[in-house]
Amino acid sequence: MDSPQRLPEPFLERLSKILPSESIAGCLAAFEQPLSTTFRVNTLRADVGSAIARLTAAGFAVRPLSCPAVEAVSAYSVPDEQRRGLTESEACRKGEIYLQNPSSMIPPLVLDPRGGERVLDLAAAPGGKALQMAAMMGNQGRLAAVEIARSRFFKMKEILSRHGARIAETYLKDGAGVWKNCPEAFDRVLLDAPCSGEGRFRAGERSSYAYWSLRKIREMARKQKRLMFSAVQCLKPGGVLVYATCTMAPEENELVLERILRRFGSALELEEIQLPIANLAPGLTQWRGKELRPEMSRCARILPDAQMEGFFVARIRKTSSTLHPGAAEGEGPVIWP
């Protein structure tokens, strides 16, 4: 198979087994191209029509994003040569726009938070998805944004404040332990988990894959399983959890889900994700000879192209409590085995 020579060979070998054969060439071609410069209008700070008019008057060639899946969040693009100017624009300084890849806009849309609800973003930095959810909620309700890395936490805090996300409450904490303080407290939970970042690889940018390895995948999967357990325990019965990563690796996607679904059985249900995206593939139902549950095909793997980064998204409904039967009497929640 033709491939970008600078991408790690083990990654390319694995990719050929993850993707549908008809999608491989397009995905490899995407790794050779720079991503488009895309952004959302932040409706917490600006009216969409007025913001676009001001950007156009300032000389930006603004176009609506050609991705029906993100039409609901006022997404646009400008030519790549205008990227720096956009980041230095008055609209950006005032928090009227937020630069964001369209794939990154998908998990909040799949979660579909509503005004008045209690929502948790369990690994929230740099804050783009929390900001998007605050806008979707009309700044009504409560939004808890958790981040463990100190430098990323303060950047997130500044972004949410500058962009007017008044309902966002920020916490410098390890998301894996949050469930101990607020078991089954949230209507919806987003876990956009830290990952190996394969969906963001670019062949001409060695920094995008310099730290990738099979060991890195295993390390991330261990973190993801702990975070996923916490996410489930934070979610109310009847609530919705969205799990997302920006990697292609099944060990960080389907196998994390397989473990959590096996652990909690009928208390969790994978729901179908249908998105109007051409570069989409269903979740895998087997990997490296391991059979996975058939409903894993309800998940969505967004394949990289010139506009979108690679992403994986799953939507889970919690049908009943996952706490220890004696939790209400003070015995505490269940412990990960």
Image (spheres, grey):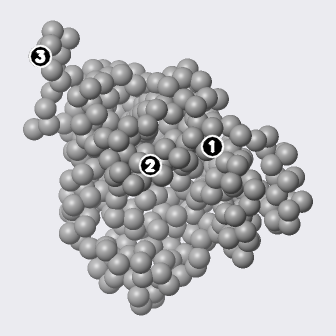
Q: Amino acid at mark 3?
A: Glu
Q: Secondary structure at mark 2?
A: helix
Q: Residues within 10 Å of mark 3 (few under 14, many from 20)?
A: few
Q: Are marks 3 and 2 in contact (CB under 8 Å)?
A: no
The residue positioned 41% from the left and 88% from the top of the image is: 6
Q: CA distance from mark 3 to mark 1?
A: 42 Å
Q: Amino acid at mark 2?
A: Phe
Could you tell which of marks 2 and 1 lies nearer the N-terminus?
A: 2
N-terminal of the two: label 3 or label 2? 2
| CB atoms of marks 2 and 1 within 8 Å | no
> Count of labels shown?
3
Identify residue for label 1.
163
Point out the frontmost of discs 2 and 1: 2
Q: CA distance from mark 2 to mark 1?
A: 14 Å
Residue at position x 58%, y 36% in the image: 165
In the picture, the quarter occupied by the N terminus is: bottom left
Q: Position of residue 277 (x, y in %)?
A: 60, 55
Q: Which residue is mark 3?
A: 331
Relative to 74, residue 21 above or below: below
